[in-house]
Image (tube, rainbow, N blue to C red):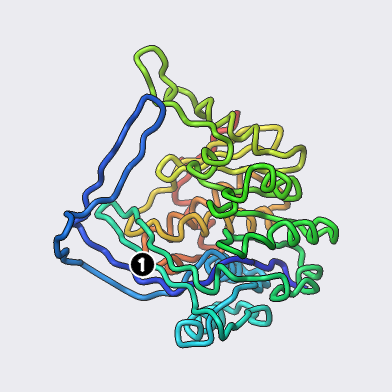
Amino acid sequence: MFDVITMGSATLDAFIETDAANILSVCTTDTKREFMAYPYGAKIEIDNFDFQTGGGAVNAASNFATLGLNASTIVKIGDEVQGQKVVATLENYGVDLSNVVKSKDYKTGFSIILISFQGDRTVLAHRGANANLVEKDINFEAIKNSKWLYLAPLNGNSTKVLDKVAEFAEENNVNLAINVGSSSIKQGKEYLYKILKTAEVVILNKDEATMLTGIHERPDTKTEKFSDEVIHPDIIKMLNELNMGEGRITIITDGKNGAYAYDSKKYYHCGEFPANVVSTLGAGDAFASTFVASLIKTEGDVEKSLKYASVVAASVVEHFSAQGGFISFEEVEKRLNRNPEFKVNII
């Protein structure tokens, strides 16, 4: 029996770092968005580059294994060198390989990650085999014999299996955590809400929460200072709508502003753990998978799990790759002990 099986994407990532990127902010009365921009038609010098394996399911499974859980992963890769690199990474972390699907028809997913001087990133993604995971690829018997199923964001045609997998997990008393992605949201609110009702843990970022609920976080105005609140009232509205009842935990991550959670009883805000940011790629996967692993370790302590997740996410952003900062629970505890002032606000 596995402690956890992850399902989602596997990629080969090309990291490209340059200080030449311009960060543009565009504000309206209702929203604020930032864009990474380069001079049109110019040749841009890069400062650093690297190739690493990644993808939500691979990152999560590797992190679960680092944290001491018996982990497997359901991913679809191509039968080529890129796919071999994904397998080698999983093997190196001690992740079970029995549920990895190799395809002769599709190439392994590939991403180009553009990293700015602030450490934030924009991703250009070719989905490849990731977008073509079908029902016959999935080992349902393995899911049935796992304690947890962690669904990383699915893409393309792969989103069509989401409801079947979620329903199967619920019928077989397998705890379900879903890290919601934009492709799943595009399947429609009614479709996704039906699936969210089956999950013990739902995790998504603020942009995805806005896309799904239609609720926007309003900026401060002359007459209203939302930033004075512990948790922005619009974030609370999002959490309320996305939480599907008692015993369910909903988390919205918000980059530099940390993360918010609601367990149908209390609201939580956990700020960023101190870090020297090199790249934010993989921070979301690290946070989400560590939260679930910590929830298992602490037998449901949301406050502690938020702290642990923030520490591992902070460790990941201090490295160029999405997996370079993975650490053990023992190391997490050491870092928390060195930062006793790091707290979670609860309302």
Q: Nearer the viewer, residue 290 or 187?
A: 187
Residue at the (56%, 86%) spot, across then down: 104
Horizontal side of 177 relative to 282 (left or right) equals right
Q: Dot 1 lies on which element? A: strand
**x 33%, y 68%: residue:** 15
**Compared with residue 332, is residue 82 higher up or lower down, i.e. above or below?**
below
Q: Quadrant of the C terminus?
A: top right
Q: Quadrant of residue 257?
A: top left
- Corner quadrant of residue 209: top right
Q: Position of residue 218 (x, y in %)?
A: 44, 26
**Nearest the eye: 20 or 162:** 162
Q: x%, y% of residue 169?
A: 78, 60
For residue 83, side relative to residue 294 (left or right): left
Q: In x, y percent, where is residue 338?
A: 45, 51
Residue located at (60% from left, 73% from top): 75
Residue 245 on image: x %, y %: 75, 37
User: In the rendered image, is residue 276 in sight?
Assistant: no
Left or right side of 120 for 104: right
List the single residue furthest toward the top: 223
Is 297 situated above or below 343? below
Type of residue at label 1?
A: Ile
Q: How many marks?
A: 1
Near-viewer residue (102 or 156): 156
Q: Quadrant of residue 172?
A: bottom right
- The residue labelled by disc 1 is 112
In this view of the protein, can residue 119 be seen by the observer? yes
